Image: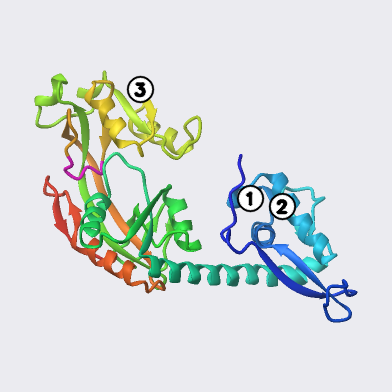
Amino acid sequence: MPDAPCFAQNISKTEYYASRPGDGRGEPEGRRRFIVDICFLETVAAVYRYRSFAEAAADRMLSQSTVSKHVSGVEKELGVKLFNRATKTSFVTLTEAGLLLLEDIDSYVAEYAGIVRKAELIRAEAENRLSLGFLPVAGSLGENRIISTFCKTHPKVKISLVPSDGAGLVKMLATGRADGVFTLGRLAEDTRRLTVDGETLEPDKYGAILTYKSNRMYCAVSDRHPLADRTELTLEDLRDETFLINNSLEEADPGARSQQFLQENLEGYRHQFMDYTLKSILYDFVAAGNGVILSSTYTGEEYRGCRFLPLREDGGTTQGWFVYRKDIQSSVLRAFRKCAMENGVDMTAGTAQAESRRP
């Protein structure tokens, strides 16, 4: 697995002093300059938080050998061991030096990340940039209409789009990799708290705008399909069809998330996995009669050669949200939030209607 870059690629080193003999480079007597890659400190902080090299590797998107290299590098620079590796469990414990130092290292990494994020916001404001995360779905969570409308009124703003799953989108927000994200979520009526992929977001920290709402499932079929003339379909009508299933974010075989969807919704039906980020290819595949798509995120878009028919079975209520951090005061983001409030999609009436809602 290729190692992911650290969050600060343009400023990759941090310098500090420690009480050691001078190094002959003009440093004060009795003090020596240390240079540590900030990525190494990020990795050490991750091991400290998870108490696990494997969990830290997954969080940082690094190999375990790279995690060990980063930890050893910091320990060598400091001249002390931070973790006890020889344990009977998969979790590491802290040495006496680790108990004294690791909380400070974790705080330093968090503070430095905040500084880098502020610098990125300053540059983004000056360069008219906006970084948005999105959830790859067969339809849209309202982002198509919102982004296209925003670009018409703000043609100089450069928008970058990054796909991820719900948990990844929340992490992108928390770490500052995205200014805002489009994701599925559920708002609790009693607490007014939004839950995304099992994680409840703090309303004091995150704001959310309802951008999509639907209470039906839709099925995309070829306009040459014998079922295309129907006004409504059932799952039994689709018994002999091949369902195209989303595996956009899974590198190889379908993982637990896709398998759970199959077991709960399409057990016994034929299926084929496809990348939903390639929507033009996906719907060309449907138009050619090679499969059908079930979607709760249809927003009324037209794709040549395809028909979208409502499913009779109850699909429950689907809600799409634009989530942003309240501490970001960028004028570009404020303008985008306003556009999102004015151009959300409500499909509960059976056709796309603009609707503005926020918790």
Magenta run includes residue 119 = no
Task: Tell me how far mark 1 sits from mark 3, CA to CA.
Answer: 35 Å
The quarter of the picture where residue 173 lies is bottom left
Q: Main secondary structure of the magenta part?
A: loop
Mark 2 secondary-structure assignment: loop
Q: Position of residue 125 (x, y in %)?
A: 38, 69
The quarter of the picture where residue 290 lies is top left
Residue occupying the point 63% across, 47% down: 62
Visible in this render: residue 258? Answer: yes
For marks 1 and 3 on the same chain, the one whose residue lies earlier in the sequence: 1
Q: Nearer the viewer, mark 2 or mark 3?
A: 2
Label 3 crowd bin: few (<14), some (14–19), many (20+), radius 10 Å: few
Q: Amino acid at mark 3?
A: Gly
Residue occupying the point 25% across, 49% down: 144
Visible in this render: residue 359? Answer: no
Q: Nearer the viewer, mark 2 or mark 1?
A: 1
Question: In the image, which disc is placed on residue 192?
Answer: none
Give the quadrant of the C terminus.
bottom left
Compare residues 75 and 167 and report the one nearer the observer: 75
Does 102 sit above or below residue 139?
below
Residue occupying the point 75% across, 66% down: 35
Label 1 crowd bin: few (<14), some (14–19), many (20+), radius 10 Å: some
Q: Which residues are magenta?
A: 296-301
For marks 2 and 1 on the same chain, the one whose residue lies earlier in the sequence: 1
Give the quadrant of the N terminus.
top right
Mark 3 secondary-structure assignment: loop
Compare residues 182 and 254 and report the one nearer the observer: 182
Residue where numbered disc 3 is placed? 268
Q: How is the image coloured?
A: rainbow
Does 45 sit above or below residue 25?
above
Residue where numbered disc 2 is placed? 91
Q: Amino acid at mark 2?
A: Phe
